[in-house]
Image (tube, rainbow, N blue to C red):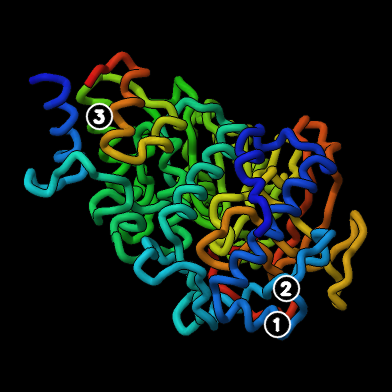
């Protein structure tokens, strides 16, 4: 068995490791996870035997990845059935197959800890009032665990008091905004929600109703993808501009992540780059699955050190992206930075919650 | 009420469980009521009961009834 390096990584600040240092620890844990899942998940073992070899790899790019679609067709887990505490699904629309992700206590716990570590690097360790651009119904059902539920619940650890802006039918509730604004607008607070919800149910409503709230103390965090906004052709830049001109919000962080790798999300920094943390890495591949150089567009492959209960630590997504740099972001955080460019053409369409 | 009683009561109210469902070995994610939602409501119950404000790290580390006692010490709440 490989020595597990996760504890060493846990001791470092989430964006402190430079590429060479990180790579050593990272590769070790990936080899450890490869072996762990190979030994504990029979379908994974079959796939690896079929696709390649179970031998340890010397380079990250040689590690066998699974296509993300696989999690829709196969129930993959590396734990005993009775140890499953939570099953998460991607929020596919009706008729679509959804991914199923199985968590045990250890992995669920790890996801929360790492999410907190990453986000704290951007917003600090104090919990803040949070305006959520969603309805409270989304988190009410204990059994249904969509990516939206998971995101709101996951981010609730950063919240001091939570206000849900939308009514049950997802309509805008100005009273809630008014109440939140009068209570909290003089201190730092958070606004959180899905990218498309914030655009359609918040930005658009403020515009339509001609509302002028000063929300300059806000840090706005949004994720879940731009796919639903494609028809509106709204860019990240335009999105930020609107938030600034409408209500004076200048701190806006998009995050990229998917339900298959919950916790180790990629946050957009002040410079507008998406950042890998010590817990994640990204590779870009061309149409022949060969590695792309920096700046070249290709399919995004994501690695995460967290999945212990299911073999989702190395997946090829259906999204396009490009690497911007390594250890060179002006924001000061180390690691790889990239840009996500949306869904690859002709890829099977998935739900709204897992693309950026 | 002693701090010990207040602490127990916060669990019962915060997690919305019956008194007979409570025990000192409770851990996060081992009963339906103590999931991520129950957790946040438990944290609010504790903050209200002891008039404290927990940091994110402590909310994340608050994994059991016993562990919680250690964490509250940092906020000068002795149980």
Q: Secondary structure at mark 2?
A: loop
Q: Are marks 1 and 2 in contact (CB under 8 Å)?
A: yes
Q: Which mark is residue A49?
A: 1
Q: Which mark is residue B46?
A: 3
Q: Which mark is residue A54?
A: 2
Question: In which quadrant of the rendered image does the N terminus of chain A lie?
Answer: bottom right
Residue A184 or residue A54, whichever sits in front: A54
Do marks 3 and 2 both belong to one polypeptide chain?
no
Instruction: From the viewer's perspective, tell me whether residue B1 is left or right of residue A122.
Output: left
Tell me which residue sits at (35%, 53%) in the image.
Answer: A135
Foreground mark, 3 or 2? 2
Asked if residue A197 can be seen in this view, the reply is yes
Question: In which quadrant of the rendered image does the C terminus of chain A lie?
Answer: bottom right
Q: Label 3 to label 1, Cα distance in Å?
A: 51 Å
Instruction: From the viewer's perspective, tell me whether residue A75 is left or right of residue A138.
Output: right
Residue A34 locus on image (x, y percent): 66, 65
Asked if residue A183 can be seen in this view, the reply is no
Foreground mark, 3 or 1? 1
Q: Label 3 to label 2, Cα distance in Å?
A: 49 Å
Q: Secondary structure at mark 1?
A: helix
Residue B36 or residue A30, whichever sits in front: A30
Tag 2 subunit: A
Q: Are marks 3 and 2 in contact (CB under 8 Å)?
A: no
Q: Are marks 3 and 1 in contact (CB under 8 Å)?
A: no
Tag 1 subunit: A
Tell me which residue sits at (27%, 49%) in the image.
Answer: B34
User: Quick check: A78 above or below B32?
Assistant: below
């Amino acid at each position: 068995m490989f020595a597990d390096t996760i504890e060493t990584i846990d001791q470092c600040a989430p964006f402190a490791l430079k590429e060479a240092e990180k790579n050593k620890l990272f590769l070790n844990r990936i080899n450890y996870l490869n072996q762990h899942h190979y030994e504990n998940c029979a379908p994974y073992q079959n796939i690896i035997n079929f696709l390649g070899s179970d031998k340890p790899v010397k380079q990250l790019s040689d590690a066998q990845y699974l296509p993300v679609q696989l999690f829709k067709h196969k129930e993959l887990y590396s734990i005993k059935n009775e140890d499953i505490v939570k099953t998460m699904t991607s929020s596919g629309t009706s008729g679509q197959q959804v991914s199923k992700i199985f968590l045990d206590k250890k992995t669920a716990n790890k996801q929360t800890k790492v999410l907190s570590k990453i986000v704290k690097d951007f917003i600090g360790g104090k919990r803040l009032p949070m305006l959520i651009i969603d309805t409270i119904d989304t988190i009410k059902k204990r059994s249904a665990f969509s990516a939206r539920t998971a995101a709101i619940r996951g981010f609730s650890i950063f919240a001091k008091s939570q206000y849900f802006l939308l009514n049950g039918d997802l309509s805008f509730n100005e009273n809630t905004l008014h109440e939140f604004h009068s209570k909290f607008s003089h201190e730092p607070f958070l606004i959180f929600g899905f990218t498309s919800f914030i655009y359609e149910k918040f930005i658009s409503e403020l515009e339509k109703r001609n509302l002028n709230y000063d929300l300059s103390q806000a840090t706005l965090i949004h994720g879940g993808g731009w796919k639903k906004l494609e028809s509106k052709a709204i860019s990240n830049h335009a999105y930020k501009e609107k938030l600034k001109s409408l209500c004076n919000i200048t701190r806006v962080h998009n995050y990229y992540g998917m339900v298959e790798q919950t916790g180790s999300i990629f946050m957009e920094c002040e410079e507008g780059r998406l950042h890998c943390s010590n817990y994640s890495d990204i590779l870009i591949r061309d149409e022949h699955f060969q590695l792309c150089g920096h700046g070249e567009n290709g399919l995004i492959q994501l690695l995460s050190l967290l999945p212990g209960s299911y073999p989702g630590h190395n997946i090829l997504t259906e999204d396009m992206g490009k690497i911007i740099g390594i250890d060179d972001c002006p924001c000061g955080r180390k690691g790889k930075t990239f840009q996500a460019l949306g869904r690859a053409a002709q890829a099977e369409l998935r739900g709204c919650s897992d693309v950026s | 009420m002693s701090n010990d009683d207040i602490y127990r009561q916060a669990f019962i109210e915060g997690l919305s469980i019956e008194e007979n469902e409570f025990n000192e070995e409770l851990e996060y994610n081992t009963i339906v009521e103590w999931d991520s939602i129950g957790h946040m409501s438990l944290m609010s119950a504790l903050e209200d009961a002891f008039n404290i404000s927990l940091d994110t790290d402590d909310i994340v580390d608050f994994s059991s009834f016993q562990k919680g006692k250690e964490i509250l010490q940092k906020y000068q709440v002795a149980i």
